[in-house]
Amino acid sequence: MSVTLREFTIADYEAAYALWQGMEGIGLSEADEKANIARYLAHNPGLSFVAEEDGVIVGALLGGSDGRRGFLNHLGVAQSHRRAGIGRALVERSLAALAGLGMRKCHIFVLAKNRAGRRFWRKIGWQERTTLLVMSQDVTASAVN
C-alpha cells in the first residue's frame, strides 16, 4: 500500500464527503456543504489533509484554528485502510501545521456514542475532557432584526 498525504483542497470535497458519509461516528450537517467547506479551507490554509492511494482518497481530516487553539474535525479513513497508521499520520500532519502557527493546544469533538472513535483518540494520546460541555445555537434563528 503506497499512501501519500497532501493538503486537502476543495477539489477533494466530493470524495472526502462520500468517505465521511459512509462512516459511523461522523455527524454531517449543512455546515458540511461544499461552500462551507470551501470557506473553512480558505480560512485555514495548510491545516487540512487527505490520504491518497492511486488517486483515490482513502482518508481525510479537517484542521483549523480560531487563532488561539487548534481544532480537528471529521477524521475518516476508509475501512479497507484502517490500522495502517493513516489516521495517526493525518492527525500528526495537521498538529505539526498547527504547531507551526504557534498553537499549543488542539481540541476535537467526538460524538459520545462513537466508541471506536473515542478508543482511537485515546490510543494516540488524547484525553477526554469531562469538565466541559458543548453548547450550540443556530445563529440564523437568533439573529436580531
Image: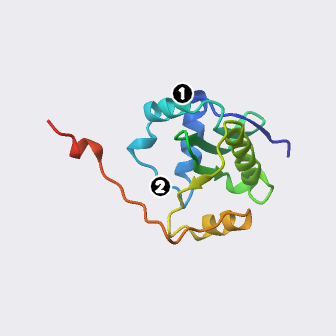
Disc 2 residue crowd, few under 14, some 14–19, many 20+, Cα 10 Å: few
- The residue at which mark 1 appears reads as 42
In the displayed structure, would residue 145 be above or below residue 95? Answer: above
Disc 1 residue crowd, few under 14, some 14–19, many 20+, Cα 10 Å: few
Residue 24: which quarter of the image? bottom right
Three-letter amino acid code of the residue under disc 2: Gly
Q: Earlier in the sequence, mark 2 or mark 1?
A: 2
Separation of residues labelled 2 and 1 (CA atoms)? 22 Å
The C terminus, quarter of image: top left
Q: Residue at x 66, y 69 (%)?
A: 119
Position of residue 124 measured from the top left corner of the image (x, y, whole percent): 74, 62
Mark 1 and mark 2 in contact (Cβ < 8 Å)? no
Position of residue 78 measured from the top left corner of the image (x, y, whole percent): 67, 52
Which residue is at the front of the view, 60 or 100?
Answer: 100
- The residue at which mark 2 appears reads as 27
Label 2's element?
loop
Position of residue 72 measured from the top left corner of the image (x, y, whole percent): 59, 49
Q: Residue at x 70, y 42 (%)?
A: 99
